[in-house]
Amino acid sequence: MVETPVKVALLGCGVVGGATASGLLTNAAAFAARAGAPLEIQSIVTLDPESVTDPTIPRTLLTTDPHAAIQGADIVVELLGGIEPARTAILEALHNGASVVTANKALLAEHGPELYAAAKNAGVDLFFEAAVGGAIPILRPLRESLAGDRVTRVMGIVNGTTNFVLDEMATSGGSLSLDAAVAQAQELGYAEADPTADIDGFDAAAKAAILASLAFHTPVSLSDVAREGIRSITTDDVAWATTTHHTIKLLAIAERTEQGISARVHPALVPNEHPLATVHGAFNAVWVEADAAGPLMVYGQGAGGTPTSSAVLGDIVTAARNRILGGAAPVETQRADLPILPAEAAESQFQIRLMVEDRPGVLAQVSGVLADHGISIDSVRQSAACHDAAGSGASVKDAESVGSATTHLLIATHHASEQAFAATLAEVSAQEPVREIVSCIRVLSM
């Protein structure tokens, strides 16, 4: 073992930063053995030193000056969050020759290529395993383990808050609204006081950009990711998902096609037999499909100070070991330069729920509109109100013949582009017997 310590500067001492600092200090001997040298925290940056109450963290290490903390550090761990001052601090650390570990998904989604280039030019490491999926090891496998394979799709549940909310709505039997489930998540500490970043999909979109960039060796930024959150999901949507043997999940999806890369975040109906449908509570899971490896999935705790610090600490140990050995890990490969497809070019299956007049010919009229736009129907179901008259396995003819004033039609389509489907939906809405488009949710194909 090398006796000279590897000096570490921690920028941020919140939930994750505090757990990281405590882990390094209380398990110093174990980390020294793994890294090959002692890991010595030289400073910890916090905007409010009085808020740090962990007895394992000496107050002499605390400072409010990121610039001073970085000087002389071998490894800088950025856990401040946000764009600035995190970006400036990381670039300064890399310029000084320090390796950097970060969990800052927003920064990587906006400025990843700039940071990767700075690390490459300095010949040092830039690690960010904790930026996606908390404790789940997914980024290094994409960057290194699958570097010899051709990844075609990466998708997953990468936001624990929304997964908890949707899971609670599903397990409540349809009695818990979205707002009530969010309030419950806030009480348990799974959601912030302002849950916008989670509920509206911003957090998942940033992670989708990172996953796509690594999987397809092409810079993908946050602005390239089409985004739709879960704010419109109702208890009725959840109940219908159960009826059709699906579970609603907020998915981050990045796909490689012959035309280019598609990256998006949206709610999706996941078939109950798909492994992603079994991910409950605040847990995360990422599903990868590759030509040679086939399908792979990693699953675990996606948030929280201790789980996330596990990924941060792993990166610190790897960065320390590389510095001792005099090398650096493989850098991000951004050389494929595949085209980024516009949001409307992405393809999905869709499930539409319509309130229509209950009279003969309505389904034929709606089906004709879909056919005119080249969209074929996979299946049709009728509303619960019609089930009593025709049964849950009712045919199209049955659905049109039930004698009430209005009825629900649930139409599942085959794959169609977002552009074609949007045009179709507008024309369907304009049809005289269509009273309302109640909901429209994408369907994950097996």
Image (cartoon, helix red, strand yellow):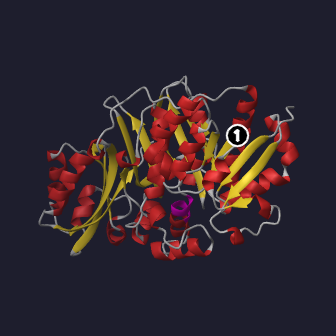
Which residue is depicted at the point 33% across and 37% down?
340
Which residue is depicted at the point 53% across and 60% down?
163
As drawn, 190 above or below 323: below
Which residue is depicted at the point 84% across and 54% down?
26
Answer whether residue 318 is magenta in the image. Answer: no
The image shows residue 96 at horizontal and vertical percentages of 61, 38
Q: What span is colored magenta in the figure?
A: 160-164
The foreground one among 405 and 41 is 41
Amino acid identity at mark 1: Asp
User: Neighbour class for label 1 at 10 Å: few (<14), some, many (≥20)?
Assistant: many
**Along the horizontal axis of the image, is 233 left or right of 170?**
left
Which residue is depicted at the point 33% across and 28% down?
258
The foreground one among 343 and 22 is 22
Q: Is residue 132 visible?
A: no
> Which quarter of the rendered picture does the N terminus lie within?
top right
* Circle 1: element type: loop
As drawn, 128 above or below 22: above
> Which quarter of the rendered picture does the C terminus lie within?
top left
Which residue is under mark 1? 74
- Name the image quarter holding residue 316: top right
The image shows residue 335 at horizontal and vertical percentages of 43, 26
**Along the horizontal axis of the image, is 90 left or right of 74?**
left
Q: What secondary structure predominates along the stretch shown in magenta?
A: helix
